[in-house]
Amino acid sequence: QVQLVESGGGLVQGGESLTLSCAASVSIFNINTMAWYRQAPGKQRELVAIITSGGSTTYADSVKGRFTISRDNAKNTVYLHMNTLKPEDTAVYYCKTTTTWGANYWGQGTQVTVSS
């Protein structure tokens, strides 16, 4: 069983920055990919960014150029650096990991609210 602990959410004004963290309970070397998803009220959960074990990254079009996903292997942690936040970025953000044995695990979610 893998546990993911997210932190860093909060209330910010439009244009400000925020960084989310997701710490995994297993070595990051047992993880194939880590990703951030978000779900706004009344909407489906959507992929925000993903990073592979090799460091390759993919972003949703809506966040390209504003968000950066990164990982710290020594801390078994993945980050989502969010810049120039917009009200439409308001959502619950979830961390997801896919392990080397093919299992998927989700974090509990952290709320990000961006005021206009």
Image: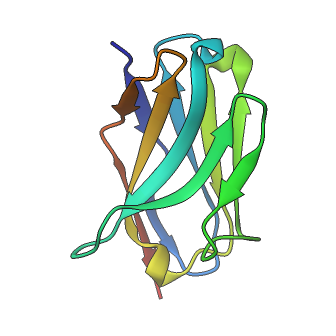
Of residues 47 and 8, the one drawn nearer to the viewer in this rendering: 47
Q: Is residue 37 left or right of residue 19?
A: left
Q: Is residue 54 left or right of residue 28?
A: right
- Coloring scheme used: rainbow
Q: How many marks?
A: 0
- Tell me the quarter of the picture where residue 79 sits: top right
Of residues 2 and 85, the one drawn nearer to the viewer in this rendering: 2
In percent of the image, x 51 and y 49: which residue is there?
36
In percent of the image, x 35 and y 36: which residue is there?
106
- Tell me the quarter of the picture where residue 86 sits: bottom right
Relative to residue 10, is residue 7 depicted above or below?
above
Relative to residue 54, is residue 47 depicted above or below?
below
Q: Position of residue 70 (x, y in %)?
A: 72, 41
Which residue is most to the bottom?
116
Relative to residue 44, is residue 102 depicted above or below?
above
Quadrant where the N terminus sits is top left
In percent of the image, x 72 and y 15: which residue is there?
74
Q: Is residue 99 left or right of residue 75?
A: left
Of residues 95 and 6, the one drawn nearer to the viewer in this rendering: 95
Relative to residue 60, is residue 14 depicted above or below?
below
In percent of the image, x 70 and y 28: which residue is there?
53
Q: Position of residue 61 (x, y in %)?
A: 64, 74
- Tell me the quarter of the picture where residue 96 sits: top left
Of residues 77 and 18, the one drawn nearer to the viewer in this rendering: 77
